[in-house]
Image (cartoon, grey):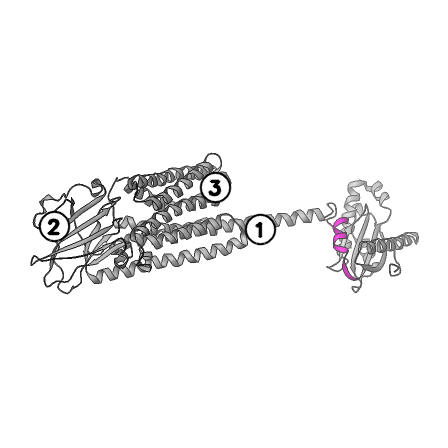
């Protein structure tokens, strides 16, 4: 039932996050998408001439086929702007570029421009890492757009997801994305604090690894969302993308480290452990190289980084198969938590290798999928902690049972001599030690055999245990000799104890009696025990000498100063 409950919660969370992932791309691309055509920059070209003669633009070749450099990007003819919208905006995905100049052609033939550089892009950066450029105001409607790109890396495209949007639509998109990223940030901080606090109590290796993972994801969300650029408008947008690539690689490496510490050790036995170390090293090395060396050998660095992600995708199925083989307790929940992020990572790798084009949904899907992973992984951690709790409770119960067995005399179930002394010595106040010995026990064994004699000892033990207060200590300290210890303030009549022994039904209805010697004194140290025991033993000897089946008390035992 517990596993089914976990599964229901997991499926519910998965459905919620998938619903968000389907709804948010619609709002993130609010506006009218624009198709564009491309032309490399040549000397002597002017915006007016290019607007007048668009025939030289290539509208069919994929953007990534052009490589890096300087380009002109011409839009289709713009749709009609709503009469009430006086502040339309142009939205494009953030890319690695040195300078972007936007030229706007209006219906009266006039051309106006605006632009930004990588250093000034922060003031135009919206959430979702989208550049939002207001269309310059003019008396008549804009009819066409022309971008001039300088120093474009063109890793995923030159102009990503261009769209014409109303100002109000841009504000709505910004609010919704702020809610999404804010919710993720709050969840991430809560998960870090909670798991770090738990680590202080449980000291499990997967807890700091999980905190590191969520911290890297939080840093990645801060950079990939564009929030860092909004917080630090002076930050170069290309440098923001350096941080973005580095934290994404660190998140992937931290995720693998978390998996390695979360699963049972047998899952990463053999070649998987060194292989996972190699993949983590490759991710961090290529991520650092991308961040530090770009734009030097940009496409090579990008391919190497994509190759590290591909190695991670190849390793994960091997980990899951090994987890299935060793019957891991955490395979089912781990597979659910990582299903969506793995699928999204596969799409990102395919995009990096130009197997399909860029989309704004894909660019923002990583944070959605990793938010889902963080939430489900936290559930996996809670499940793991529950199993740890069960294991510790079981171990504690076994330890208690083992301690009881170690302290118990196996025939009678009473304390053995060692356990009796451990509990007796150090009791405050005067204590009464009562030594009981079964009378003529050798005759009993000769009469009914040793099995019958053992049963007699068990019956006598029960009688003695039931004759004294609950806080008394009762032990078998010799063959047929028993010790009873209780506080001197508790009145226990030895004659009543003997009467109870006589009243027990014995094997073969034989009559069994006992003799008792008592002594009272302190029991704070081992020397007290020796003195008290010898005192009670002399009293027992006196009872035997008096004819047995009786009790004798010795004077209070005191050690001479």
Asked whether the residues under the numbered discs 1 and 3 touch, taking CB atoms below 8 Å apart as contact, a structural biologist would say no
Label 2 element class:
loop
Part of the protein shown in magenta: 410-429
Which disc number belongs to residue 328?
3
Q: Is residue 5 visible?
A: no
Near mark 1 (Cα within 10 A), the count class, few <14, some 14-19 or many ≥20, is few
Near mark 3 (Cα within 10 A), the count class, few <14, some 14-19 or many ≥20, is some
Q: Is residue 181 visible?
A: yes
Q: Earlier in the sequence, mark 3 or mark 2?
A: 2
Cα separation, mark 3 vs mark 2, equals 66 Å
Whether the magenta-drawn stretch holds residue 424 is answered as yes
Position of residue 550 measured from the top left corner of the image (x, y, whole percent): 88, 55
Q: Name the residue nearer the viewer: 473 or 370.
A: 370
Label 1 element class:
helix
Residue ID for mark 2: 46
Position of residue 523 measured from the top left corner of the image (x, y, whole percent): 80, 58
Identify the residue at image location x=21%, y=57%.
Answer: 133
């Amino acid at each position: 039932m517990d596993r089914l409950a976990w599964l229901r919660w997991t499926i519910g969370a998965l459905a919620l996050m998938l619903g968000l992932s389907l709804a948010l791309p619609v709002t993130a691309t609010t506006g009218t998408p624009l198709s564009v055509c491309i032309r490399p920059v040549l000397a002597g070209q002017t915006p007016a001439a290019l607007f007048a003669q668009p025939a030289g633009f290539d509208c069919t070749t994929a953007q990534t086929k052009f490589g890096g450099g300087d380009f002109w990007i011409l839009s289709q003819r713009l749709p009609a702007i709503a009469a009430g919208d006086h502040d339309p905006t142009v939205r494009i995905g953030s890319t690695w570029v040195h300078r972007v100049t936007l030229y706007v052609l209006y219906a009266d033939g006039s051309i106006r421009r605006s632009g930004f550089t990588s250093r000034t892009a922060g003031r135009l950066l919206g959430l979702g890492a989208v550049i939002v450029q207001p269309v310059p105001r003019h008396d008549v409607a804009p009819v066409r757009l022309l971008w001039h790109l300088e120093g474009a890396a063109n890793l995923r495209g030159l102009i990503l997801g261009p769209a014409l949007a109303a100002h109000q639509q841009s504000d709505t998109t910004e609010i919704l994305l702020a809610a999404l990223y804010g919710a993720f940030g709050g969840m991430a901080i809560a998960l870090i604090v909670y798991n770090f606090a738990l680590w202080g109590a449980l000291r499990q290796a997967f807890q700091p690894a999980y905190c590191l993972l969520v911290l890297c994801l939080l840093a990645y969300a801060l950079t990939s969302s564009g929030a860092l650029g909004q917080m630090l408008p002076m930050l170069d947008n290309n440098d923001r993308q350096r941080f973005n690539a580095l934290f994404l690689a660190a998140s992937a490496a931290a995720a693998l480290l978390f998996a390695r510490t979360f699963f049972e050790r047998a899952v990463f036995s053999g070649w998987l452990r060194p292989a996972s170390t190699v993949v983590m090293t490759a991710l961090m090395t290529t991520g650092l190289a991308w961040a530090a060396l770009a734009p030097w050998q940009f496409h090579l660095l990008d391919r190497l980084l994509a190759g590290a992600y591909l190695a991670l995708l190849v390793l994960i199925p091997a980990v899951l198969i090994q987890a299935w083989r060793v019957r891991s307790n955490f395979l089912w929940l781990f597979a659910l938590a990582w299903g969506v992020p793995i699928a999204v990572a596969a799409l990102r790798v395919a995009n990096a290798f130009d197997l399909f084009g860029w989309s704004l949904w894909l660019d923002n899907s990583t944070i959605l999928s990793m938010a889902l992973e963080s939430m489900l992984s936290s559930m996996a951690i809670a499940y793991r902690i529950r199993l740890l709790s069960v294991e510790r409770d079981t171990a504690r119960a076994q330890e208690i049972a083992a301690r009881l067995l170690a302290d118990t005399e196996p025939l009678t179930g009473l304390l053995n001599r060692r356990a009796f002394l451990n509990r007796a010595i150090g009791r405050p106040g005067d204590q009464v030690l009562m030594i009981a010995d079964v009378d003529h026990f050798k005759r009993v064994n000769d009469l009914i055999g040793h099995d019958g004699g053992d049963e007699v000892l068990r019956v006598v033990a029960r009688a003695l245990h039931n004759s004294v207060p609950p806080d008394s200590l009762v032990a078998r300290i010799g063959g047929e000799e028993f010790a009873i210890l209780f506080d001197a303030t508790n009145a226990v009549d030895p004659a009543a104890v003997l009467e109870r022994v006589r009243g027990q039904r014995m094997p073969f209805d034989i009559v069994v009696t006992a003799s008792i010697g008592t002594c009272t004194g302190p029991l704070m140290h081992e020397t007290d025990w020796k003195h008290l025991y010898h005192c009670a033993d002399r009293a027992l000897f006196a009872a035997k000498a008096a004819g047995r089946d009786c009790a004798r008390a010795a004077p209070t035992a005191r050690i001479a100063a």
